[in-house]
Image (cartoon, rainbow, N blue to C red):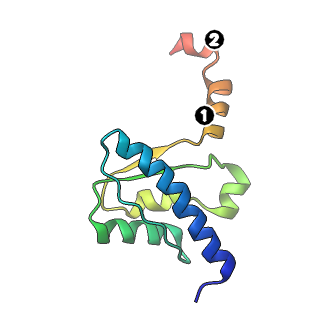
Amino acid sequence: MPHPQLTDLVTYARNYLQNIATQLELDDFVVRLVAEFGDDPAYTITNTAKELQVDAIIMSTHGRSGISRWIFGSITGNVLSVATCPVLVVPSRECERVVTCDCLAPSSAAQM
């Protein structure tokens, strides 16, 4: 049986995802909500996607780089390397702010 804090975390995740799923369903998306836990997140994600025969996996990045990426690894990268369906990677809002500030300055945008 999972640790009570883990059970609370899964419940929180399900509630969070249900709110997002409800919003998407209002826009006529077909959503199947799954919140699971496992030792290897990339395996859990890709295996669940394969079992459910999903059309695509959509996931966000944390925008880690350097030493933190080396320490924590890249779940998104691992999913991309083993998924048998298309994977859409959406940058986190924090990552978007960094990209907007650093890469899309008027001088660099004019050179593109």
At x 42% / y 49%, what residue is drawn? 22
* Disc on res. 107: 2
Q: Amino acid at mark 2?
A: Ser
Q: Does dot 2 land on a helix, a strand or a loop?
A: helix
Residue 70 percent across, percent down from the top left: 67, 60
Q: Which residue lies at the image location 46% right of the left edge and 46% below the top edge?
A: 89
Q: Residue furthest bottom?
A: 1
Query: Residue 108 at x, y = what percent?
Result: 60, 16
The residue at which mark 1 appears reads as 96
Query: From the viewer's perspective, is the residue at label 1 or at label 2 nearer?
Result: 1
Q: Is 74 situated above or below 64?
A: below
Task: Report x, y in % for residue 25.
Answer: 36, 46
Tags 1 and 2 touching, CB below 8 Å: no
- Quarter of the image for residue 100 reads top right
In-image side of 38 versus 54 (left or right):
right
Instruction: Locate the N terminus by quadrant.
Output: bottom right
As drawn, the residue found furthest toward the right would be 67
